[in-house]
Amino acid sequence: MNVDIAPAVEHLDPSRHFGIRLSATARGARLARHLSAEQLASWGWPYDSEANRAASLLVAELATNAVVHGHARGRDFRLRLTLHPEDTTLRIELTDARPDRRPPAPGTLRPAAPDTESGRGLLLVEALSTHWGTTGGDPYTKTVWCEVALR
């Protein structure tokens, strides 16, 4: 498990960062949610706050998608949190190993059929976040990200 934590240095970079690589398994997705909740609590948003619960849910949905749709044998996924204290916005990024499997574009999601057990995760991401999308930084990965106001 590789962890990167950069404390805030107000005069250089007011943002706070947390990053970790996790196994692309259900256990890795659960750990992403728990570590995110812990990190937010250390940044001042307690576990029982609405902001922490919303951010943890967003991480859980994106991490689950990274495991289910972005899994490539032997490859991990990466979680990155960036807190921008000037407007209390949290950016959540999940990077996986399947750039060929991109989710639908924001604003184009269709509701899942009532009798299905899946297909609602990105609808939750769209409903709870202020922005979300997908980027590809290299030919081997894609990043699905969202931003949420923690006020």
Image (cartoon, rainbow, N blue to C red):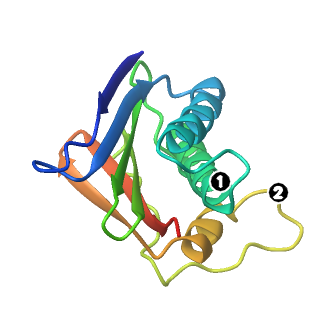
Point out the residue furthest to the bottom here: 107
Looking at numbered disc 1 in the image, what kind of residue is underneath it?
Answer: Leu
Q: Residue at x 80, y 74 (%)?
A: 113
On residue 92, the disc is none
Q: Secondary structure at mark 2?
A: loop
Taking 145 as reference, is 113 left or right? right
User: Residue 71, percent across and down?
Assistant: 48, 34
Front residue of 134 and 58? 58
Quadrant where the N terminus is found in the figure: top left
Question: Disc 2 marks which residue?
Answer: 117
Q: Is residue 123 left or right of residue 39?
A: right
Q: Secondary structure at mark 1?
A: helix
Residue contact between numbered discs 1 and 2, judged by CB atoms under 8 Å: no
Place of residue 127 in the rendered image (x, y in percent of width and height, measured from the top left): 61, 76
Camera-near label (1 vs 2) is: 1
Dot 1 or dot 2: first in sequence order is 1
Q: Is residue 140 above or below residue 85?
A: above
Instruction: Farthest residue to the left: give it.
Output: 12
Where does residue 123 sit, x and y in percent of width and height? 63, 71
In the rendered structure, the answer to whether residue 149 lies left or right of residue 54 reads: left
Q: Which residue sits at x=36%, y=37%? A: 18
Query: Which residue is labeled 1 in the image?
Result: 57
- Please tell me whether residue 3 is drawn above or below residue 84 in the rendered image: above
Which residue is more in the foreground, 10 or 127?
10
Q: Please rate how many residues cluster around mark 1, counting C-alpha atoms within 10 Å: few if below 14, some from 14 to 19, many from 20.
A: some
Check disc 2 and give the amino acid type. Answer: Glu
Q: Residue at x 70, y 65 (%)?
A: 120
Q: Label 2 crowding class (10 Å Cα cut-off): few <14, some 14-19, many 20+? A: few
Against 46, is 127 above or below?
below
Residue 85 vs residue 129: left or right?
Answer: left
Spot occupied by residue 59 in the image (x, y as percentages of width and height): 55, 48
